[in-house]
Image (spheres, grey):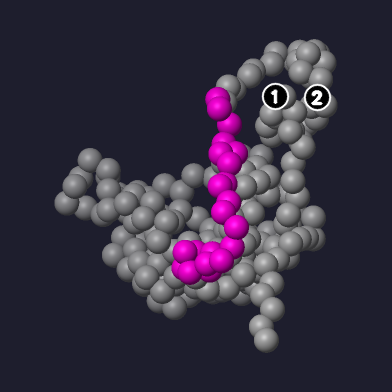
Amino acid sequence: MARKADYSGIRPDVKNANKGTERGRYMVEASLRETGAGRSILLDKDGRIIAGNKTFEAASDIGLPVRIVQTDGSELVAVQRTDLDLDDYTGTARKLAYYDNRTSSVDLAWDVEQILADVNAGLDLSGLWFEHELDGLLNGIAGEVVDPAQEWQGMPEFVQPDTMPYRTINVHFNDDAAVQDFARIIGQDLTDKTKYVWHPEQKPQKRLDVQYVTNES
C-alpha cells in the first residue's frame, strides 16, 4: 500500500533566486515519474526549503510522499536506493544520474532582482562568482537585450581592456603564520574571508548598487 503524501511542515522559499524554466520543470517531473526520487531536498529549521524547491513542487504535484531526516550538518546524509544498480543499463540508475545533472542546468534561470536584494541586504556571494561575473549578471536588470551596434551609433570609440588575470596560481599554507608571512611579502592584508588577491594589488570596484537607466522623452 502506497504511503500517503504529507507535506505539512514544509514550505517553499518565497525568495528563491532561481526562477526555474518551463522545460526544466517538465524534466524534473519526468525524472520523478520515470526514475523516482534521487537526491534529497534541504530544509531550514522552520521547514523552509533551502535547496530543492522545484523538486518539491514536482513531487507534490504527482503526490510523491516526503520523509524528513533531521541533521545538524555535521554529517553527510546519503540516500541509498536499494532498487537501483548502476551496472544495470536496462534499469533506471544510470538514467537517474543523467537526470540529476541535466535538470540542474536546464532548470536554472537566475532572478537578478532577488540576487540584487540579497546582496544589498549583506549577503556575501563573492565565493560563487568573480566580481565581473556578478556585475554582468546583475546588469541584466537593465531590461531587454539590444543590438549594441545600433545603440553605439554616433558614440565615441571605446575598446574594453582585458581584465582577466595573466596567470593564476594556487598557494597553500601550513598555518596562519605562513599566511601572515606571505601577506607581509606581497604587502596586502589576508583575512579568513580573503578569496583571492591581485599582485600588484588592485582595489575592487563595487558597482552592485548601480543600475543602467535610460531617459525617454
Which label was assigned to residue 199?
Answer: 1
Q: Which residue occupies 49% across, 44% down?
A: 78
Q: Count neighbours of disc 1 (C-alpha within 10 A) and say few if under 14, some if 14 to 19, many if 20 or more.
A: few
Is residue 128 among what the camera can see? no
Q: Nearer the viewer, residue 168 or 201?
A: 201
Give x and y (percent) for residue 90.
17, 51
Span shown in magenta: 147-167
Q: Amino acid at mark 1?
A: His
- Magenta run includes residue 184: no
Q: Amino acid at mark 2?
A: Gln
Q: Nearer the viewer, residue 208 or 12?
A: 208
Mark 1 or 2: in front is 1
- Magenta run includes residue 157: yes
Which label was assigned to residue 161?
Answer: none
Give x and y (percent) for residue 12.
61, 71
- Who comes first in sequence, dot 1 or dot 2? 2
Tag 1 and tag 2, C-beta contact below 8 Å: yes
To which residue does mark 2 refer? 188
Give x and y (percent) for residue 187.
81, 20
Picture quadrant of residue 193: top right
Relative to 130, does residue 170 appear above or below in the rendering?
above
Image quadrant occupied by the C terminus: bottom right
Picture quadrant of residue 29: bottom left
